[in-house]
Image: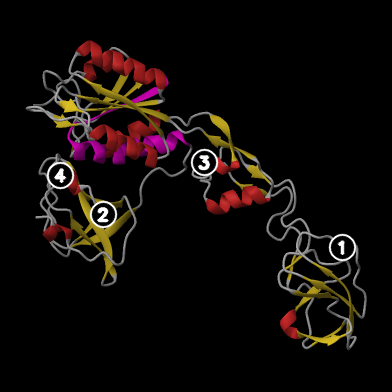
Amino acid sequence: MADPKYAMVDPAVALETVLKNVRPLRHESARLPEASGRVLARDLIASADLPPFPSSAVDGYAVISGDHTPTRRVLAEVTAGVARDVTVTLGTAVRTMTGAPVAYGADAVAMVEYVDDLGGGEIQLTRPLRAGENINRAGQDVKAGQLVLAAGTLLGAPEVGLLAALGQEMVTVFRRPRVAVISTGDELVEPWEATGPAQIRDSNRYAIMAAVEQAGGTPISMGIAKDVLEEQRERIRLGLEQADVLITSGGVSVGVLDLIKGILEGMGTVHFGRVSMKPGKPLTFATVGEKYFFGLPGFPVSSLVTFELFVRPGLLKLQGHPEVRRPRVEVVLDHDVTPAPDRSEFQRAVVRWERGALRASTTGLQASGRLLSMVGANALLTFGPGEKKAAGESITAILTGPISRDLVINHHAACK
């Protein structure tokens, strides 16, 4: 049954509506150990050269490259972390370890493999050197005043290492969103509880909270709300009070006990209440003041697919990510697929690299309640309304996980 209050919107329009309304959260300071996975909120300008002094790239001897003296007297030995007040002149050298400062006067470092030790503190080079050879120059990596990392950069291992090298104990990043999650329904019990007649365990809330964490948010469990108007209204109020984003599961269709949309209409603005897609048609998005609300369908697959397509991009934008959409690739189908005749459809699939191409098989039965169809999937195949595809034809896939060269199991056949 259609909901006369809400026009059916195209999935692309729904996503644009979410992204148009979502604004990045405020900035905060994070200690370097907690910076990984965060998004830089301000440009980082180097305050000093990196490396800060000329250093040796090898174990060897610091010398003057244009010195043609047949033998050289070793003045001292310099190791990493030790500064020595010594100057190389014609006919001399300084034994220098990797990472150690290059002595004054030297303009190259001869590798130990190309040096003969003559004994008595004398050495002889077995090959000529060019100026600058085996020396890491001051400022070679970064110059003082240089833009090192731009605002919007996702901080991974190399970026965190660079911040540490530049002495950044604290870094300004976008705040992680707090995300409250509520499951609705009289039929739900906690996973550890025994089920009675007509009851099921609540899997959606735990799956959604895991997805929130994977998207960089901080999940807050708000428990199960029964199909009682006042209980759901109060739980929603509390969730919005505690979090930046509130996600509910169930209660957004057109049944007698689907109460969520009516509650939201009295609290904020419902931007859409139906999306022309399968699975996930009753998806609802609303804003309440500066808070964001996603009403996800109750079926487990519908809940996770709509999270992937609409909630995840919203959470990434809140955190300042410059790119919030998953990569899309063209894949070759292993088998015929007949999607929904009247709506866009997103079928769960396994994409793998095989025989010189990206190939895809669906994960079997695509029913909205079959959570197993999400397990092992690394892509969503995108079908337009009634867009049938035959084996060997190409289709666009949204990659939701890594592609494995070794994954050659035909999931379509295995899961039938």
Left or right: where 176 falls relative to 400: right
* Residue 73 locus on image (x, y percent): 90, 80
What is the number of callouts on the image?
A: 4
Identified by mark 3, the residue type is Val
* Residue 107 locus on image (x, y percent): 82, 72
Over which residues does the magenta segment extend?
A: 290-319
Q: Which residue is mark 4?
A: 385
* Residue 125 locus on image (x, y percent): 81, 85
N-term mark: 3 or 1 = 3
Looking at the image, residue 172 lies above or below residue 73 = above
Dots 3 and 2: beta carbons under 8 Å?
Answer: no
Q: Quadrant of the C terminus?
A: bottom left
Q: Which residue is mark 2?
A: 396
Density class for disc 2 (Cα within 10 Å; few <14, some 14-19, many ≥20) is: some
Density class for disc 3 (Cα within 10 Å; few <14, some 14-19, many ≥20) is: many
Q: Secondary structure at mark 1?
A: loop
Density class for disc 1 (Cα within 10 Å; few <14, some 14-19, many ≥20) is: some
Q: Distance of mark 2 from mark 4, alpha carbons?
A: 14 Å
The dot on residue 84 is 1
